[in-house]
Amino acid sequence: MRVDGKQFRTIWLSPDPKVIQIIDQRHLPHEFIIENLVTVDDFACAIKEMHVRGAGLIGATAGFAMYAAALSAPVDGCQSYLEQAAKKLLATRPTAKNLAWAIDRQQRAMARESSIDAKRATALATATEIADEDADFCRRIGEHGLTIIRQISEAKGGRPVNILTHCNAGWLAFVDYGSATSPIYAAHKAGIPVHVWVDETRPWLQGSRLTAWELGQEGVPHTLIPDNTGGHLMQHGLVDMVIVGTDRTTRSGDVANKIGTYLKALAAMDNQVPFYVALPSSTFDWQIRDGVREIPIEERSDAEIKFVSGRAESGKLETVLIAPESTRGANYGFDVTPARLITGLITERGITPAREADILGLYPEQR
């Protein structure tokens, strides 16, 4: 996607093949900073501390992290070294399925090679495949989701389609295009009038800082709202559809996404507003069915809800305390939306009801 008119992905190989570059998302929207990642520790820190975030981008970053591990692995003890690197990376973000999926894909690919040089070449090729595949799948999600937006637009006589989204399931959460935003970008490019209600998404404010920024870069009309506004908008007919992303989806269609998604789904159900989830197949966890019971929910530091960062009137970036210093906070990163509340899943293979039989109809190899 574009930054000041220039095309960027969220992660890429630098001219030095030992260095991977990312957009450090902690500084957006105020500063656009490119960060170099070299060691496994660099990658682990970038994932855990949210220099990168979002299901697809976490997976792509993990893929390149295993390539970095292969570059630094000793000839003697290579396998043990790679296993330790994988273990360190897996501990960074427990909820996102793409993390484990990418690491497993790298481990299986490298296991087929005998020499360290072959392992390194395979690791680079696999990391590149993961990133390219993520971008292509998101592009296809946009094509499928476009049909829904077009139908709503036609039913409204060409008036703008009002779409509510939560968190950032955009280009910044993947390698390119995004999942929830890909249909929006496709509709905008096709000349269909769209308007996006952007949830601020406490406590990391991914909506305020990231979704609003990237929609602005693409020229998509949008309005920033507090997290608790969505239900009110739906009651008054100001939301035509909801599109969100997901960090892990069960084979039966339950979805783990940023905390607050479940509440949006309940409000959408009560107001007969279609609620869609956009995801590439790498986000499915084919081993589980009950999302509430089986998906691990990440708990993060309460400092993230007690402090807020931004640009002060002086122009400087500052972090300030917004709660009593002695108050304890509970900071759950995700919640689970049951399949019964979901109108449909928009995947790279098409749109399906959030039911196991229908999902497996799109992915028969997972039966």
Image (spheres, helix red, strand yellow):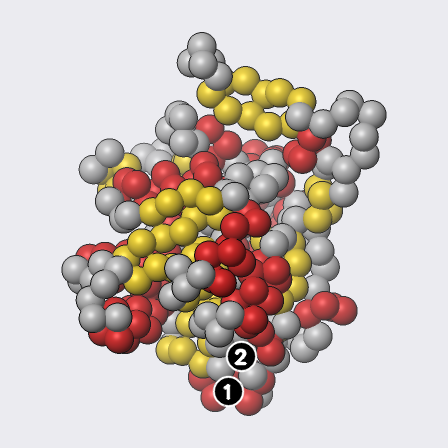
Q: Marks 2 and 1: which is nearer the front?
A: 2
Whether 315 is drawn above or below 211: the answer is above
Residue assigned mark 1: 358
Q: Nearer the viewer, residue 234 or 166?
A: 234
Residues at marks 2 and 1 touching, judged by CB atoms closer than 8 Å: yes
Q: Residue at x 60, y 28 (%)?
A: 308
* Residue extending furthest toward the front: 236
Mark 1 nearby-residue class (10 Å; few <14, some 14–19, many ≥20): some
Give the SS element for disc 1: helix
Q: Residue at x 45, y 81 (%)?
A: 352
Give the SS element for disc 2: loop
User: Could you say which quadrant of the image residue 144 lies in?
Assistant: bottom left
Q: Look at label 2 and name its amino acid.
A: Ala
Q: How many marks?
A: 2
Q: Residue at x 45, y 10 (%)?
A: 314
Q: Is residue 356 visible?
A: yes
Residue assigned mark 2: 354
| For residue 82, side relative to residue 230 (left or right) | right
| For residue 229, side relative to residue 252 (left or right) | left
| For residue 241, side relative to residue 193 (left or right) | right
Query: Residue 60: x percent and y percent?
Result: 47, 52
Image quadrant occupied by the C terminus: bottom right
Query: Residue 252: x percent and y percent?
Result: 61, 80
Q: Nearer the viewer, residue 84 or 220?
A: 220
Q: Look at label 1 and name its amino acid.
A: Asp
Q: Is residue 79 visible?
A: no
Q: CA distance from mark 2 to mark 1?
A: 7 Å
Q: Residue at x 76, y 25 (%)?
A: 324
* Residue extending furthest toward the top: 314
Q: Nearer the viewer, residue 160 or 139?
A: 160
Mark 2 nearby-residue class (10 Å; few <14, some 14–19, many ≥20): many
Query: Residue 208: x percent and y percent?
Result: 46, 39
